[in-house]
Image: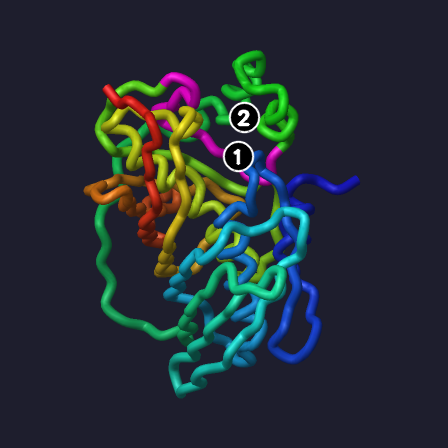
């Protein structure tokens, strides 16, 4: 019997169609379109599959062009832009129904020694002391619309544990800061690409909605339109996605119907693993914020 993590790793294991061309399927997480983290992670996998030498992703940037159709597979076309002595550069275009829905640029670097410093990890309660987000959702199942209830409360491949949980149906005004522990549920193979792709998948989770916190607007509020516009990920050092990581997020600005959020991802031992930044559409249609 397969586990949700097995299903996620299968989702990220793209089918090769031709040289530099891959196909990926979709997973419904309770939205009406393909989850942005999925297409971002699949595009990263497609790019890495075309890098023949021992070089790993360090810088990945994506633009969301059109909403993804959950009912149709996604085809990824990879352009091999450059293979240098230290770095390799790839460009990926994701296609559905003959149209580009997403494009990604990624750079891969061979391992080197160098200067080391980092910002300290925030002081927050350990993940073992916190309930999972799934447990919290199941406790409020009767408040979840019936059409979403089964998907929202299904078993997950990733355990998310918010330090300060947000009520998805009744948000309060709070500073635009959020801390979230997460890890894959189960043991993963050692291949670094798998761990990077799972982190890439999870890095889109809860990031944009951090920009809603100072306005007291819930992401489930009627009339609110949210959509990722771009997403950037910098991978600083090797890590394991099946061990606890802390996602420290903040949103320094929202303006012009766009919200900007950024994040730092740490290992439980305090190493800065990755940095993230995202801008998204935050459009209010007849929504009254406090």
Q: Foreground residue, 17 or 236?
A: 17
Local crowd size for mark 1, using a 10 Å CA cut-off: few (<14), some (14–19), many (≥20) = some
Give the residue number, with chain letter if any, for mark 1: 159
Looking at the image, residue 201 lies above or below residue 107? above
Check the picture and name the quadrant holding the N terminus.
top right
Asked if one can make out residue 240 in the rendered structure from this viewpoint, the answer is no
On the image, the x and y values in percent for residue 89 come to 42, 77
Marks 1 and 2, Cα distance to the nearest angstrom?
8 Å
Query: From the viewer's perspective, is 230 left or right of 118?
Result: right
First in sequence: mark 1 vs mark 2:
2
On the image, the x and y values in percent for residue 275 come to 32, 53
Query: From the viewer's perspective, is 289 left or right of 269?
Result: left
Give the residue number, with chain letter if any, for mark 2: 134
Is 161 magenta? The answer is yes
Residue at image position (56%, 76%) is 50
Q: Which residues are magenta?
A: 156-170
Q: Which mark is residue 75?
A: none
Check the picture and name the quadrant holding the C terminus.
top left
On the image, the x and y values in percent for residue 166 come to 38, 23
Looking at the image, residue 84 lies above or below residue 42? below
């Amino acid at each position: 019997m397969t586990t949700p993590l097995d299903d996620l790793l299968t989702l990220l294991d793209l089918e090769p169609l031709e040289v530099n061309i891959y196909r990926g399927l979709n997973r419904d997480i309770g939205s009406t379109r393909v989850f942005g983290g999925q297409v971002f992670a699949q595009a990263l996998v497609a790019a890495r599959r075309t890098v023949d030498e021992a070089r790993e992703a360090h810088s990945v940037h994506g633009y969301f062009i059109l909403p993804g159709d959950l009912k149709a597979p996604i085809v990824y076309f990879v352009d091999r832009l450059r293979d240098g002595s230290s770095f390799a550069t790839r460009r990926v275009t994701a296609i559905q129904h003959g149209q580009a829905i997403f494009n990604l640029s990624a750079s891969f670097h061979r391992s080197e020694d160098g200067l080391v410093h980092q910002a300290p990890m925030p002081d927050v309660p350990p993940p073992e002391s916190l309930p999972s987000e799934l447990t919290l959702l199941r406790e409020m199942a009767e408040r979840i619309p019936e059409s979403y209830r089964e998907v929202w409360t299904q078993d997950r491949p990733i355990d998310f544990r918010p330090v300060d949980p947000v009520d998805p149906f009744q948000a309060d005004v709070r500073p635009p800061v959020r801390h979230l522990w997460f890890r894959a549920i189960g043991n993963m193979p050692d291949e670094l690409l798998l761990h990077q792709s799972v982190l890439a998948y999870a890095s889109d989770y809860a990031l944009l909605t951090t920009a809603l916190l100072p306005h007291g607007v819930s992401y489930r509020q009627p009339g609110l339109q949210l959509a990722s516009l771009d997403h950037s990920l910098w991978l600083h050092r090797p890590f394991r996605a099946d061990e606890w990581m802390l996602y420290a997020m903040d949103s320094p600005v929202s303006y012009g119907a766009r919200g900007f959020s950024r994040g730092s991802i740490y290992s439980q031992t305090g190493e800065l693993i990755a940095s993230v930044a995202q801008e998204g559409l935050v459009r209010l249609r007849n929504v009254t914020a406090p």
